[in-house]
Image: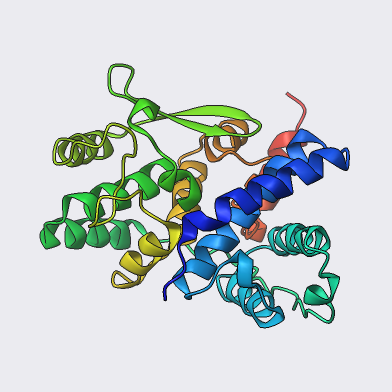
């Protein structure tokens, strides 16, 4: 019998109550709740739930996150939430010996060239799927995270001010809509009557990160590559680093700096130094 994902909600609620009794901060409780909900969604897709949690489930989920190339900090945060949940269940043995491999990151940020961007947009439009076209435009032209895209509600799209509102636990940011993004978002939103979620599955439910990632695979791209392309294109267009950082929602300014190309021609660098220190 297929587990019902909603059956785990009371258990997560009780866990949050227990955390409150442990004097955990509201931010910690919110983070653990979010991580457990993601874990439960994955369990549900794999025919299980939090009520019947096993050590193999936890190890396989950590492996899944590593294969998704999630950051080391993200995996540590998830593992911490699950470890605390196991303590709440009075089953600490569930996390004994769980292996977490260091995530190897490619130093070079992968982005699409201008021609590749144009080819991608042309291809997805030719396929004629309004939702997929809108998703690709939003990810490429706003740089939002796939998790943020999945949480978008109609109230987050302001066509009058021509902007998208991204809400996170630490605040919100406004991102202007390109002409293409606005056009394809409007067309897609006119095609369904959901009063809340912007992007839906074929069955009318709010779309999931996994569904988006699976859809993008056929176009040989992933959400991170589209997000990196957004940031890189702005940097290459001489947009101020601080503005790019705000639009991308980077908490650490050093993350934004990675998009600045360090490969400067030696002669060009010499000219820059001479110009900077020449007395006028």
What residue is shown at x 78% (from left), y 65% (from top)?
A: 86
Q: In which quarter of the image is residue 273?
A: top right
Left or right of 19, for residue 228? left
Left or right of 203, for residue 80? right
| Residue farthest toward the front in the current orientation of the protein | 1
What residue is shown at x 42% (from left), y 76% (from top)?
A: 1
Q: Which one is nearer the viewer's eye here, 219 or 195?
A: 195
Residue 231 seen by the camera: yes
Q: Position of residue 65 (x, y in %)?
A: 61, 70
In the rendered view, would you say 19 is above or below 62?
above
Q: Where is residue 194 in the image (x, y as percent from the top left)?
A: 25, 37
Q: In which quarter of the image is residue 73?
A: bottom right
In the rendered view, would you say 113 is above or below 25?
below
Residue 252 seen by the camera: no
Q: Position of residue 94 (x, y in %)?
A: 78, 75
What residue is shown at x 85% (from left), y 39% (from top)?
A: 21
Q: Position of residue 264 (x, y in %)?
A: 63, 57
Q: In which quarter of the image is residue 20?
A: top right
Location of the C terminus (image quadrant)? top right
């Amino acid at each position: 019998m297929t587990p019902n994902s909603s059956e785990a909600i009371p258990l997560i609620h009780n866990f949050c109550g227990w955390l409150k009794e442990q004097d955990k901060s509201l931010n910690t409780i919110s983070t653990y709740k979010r991580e457990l909900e993601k874990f439960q969604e994955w369990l549900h897709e794999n025919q299980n739930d939090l009520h019947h949690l096993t050590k193999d489930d936890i190890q396989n989920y950590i492996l899944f996150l590593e294969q998704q190339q999630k950051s080391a900090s993200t995996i540590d945060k998830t593992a911490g939430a699950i470890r605390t949940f196991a303590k709440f269940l009075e089953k600490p043995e569930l996390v004994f010996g769980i292996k977490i491999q260091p995530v190897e990151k490619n130093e070079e940020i992968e982005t699409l060239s201008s021609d590749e961007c144009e080819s991608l947009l042309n291809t997805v439009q030719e396929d004629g799927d309004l939702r997929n076209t809108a998703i690709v435009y939003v990810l490429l032209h706003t740089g939002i995270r796939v998790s943020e895209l999945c949480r978008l509600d109609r109230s987050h799209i302001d066509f009058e001010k021509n902007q998208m509102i991204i809400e996170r636990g630490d605040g919100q940011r406004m991102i202007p809509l390109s002409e293409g993004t606005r056009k394809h978002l409007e067309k897609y939103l006119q095609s369904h009557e959901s009063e809340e979620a912007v992007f839906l599955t074929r069955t009318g439910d709010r779309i999931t990160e996994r569904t988006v990632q699976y859809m993008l695979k056929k176009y040989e791209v992933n959400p991170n590559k589209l997000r990196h392309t957004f940031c890189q294109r702005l940097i290459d267009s001489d947009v101020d680093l601080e503005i790019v950082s705000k639009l991308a929602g980077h908490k650490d300014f050093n993350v934004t700096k990675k998009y600045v190309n360090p490969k400067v021609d030696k002669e060009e660098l010499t000219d820059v130094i001479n110009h900077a220190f020449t007395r006028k």
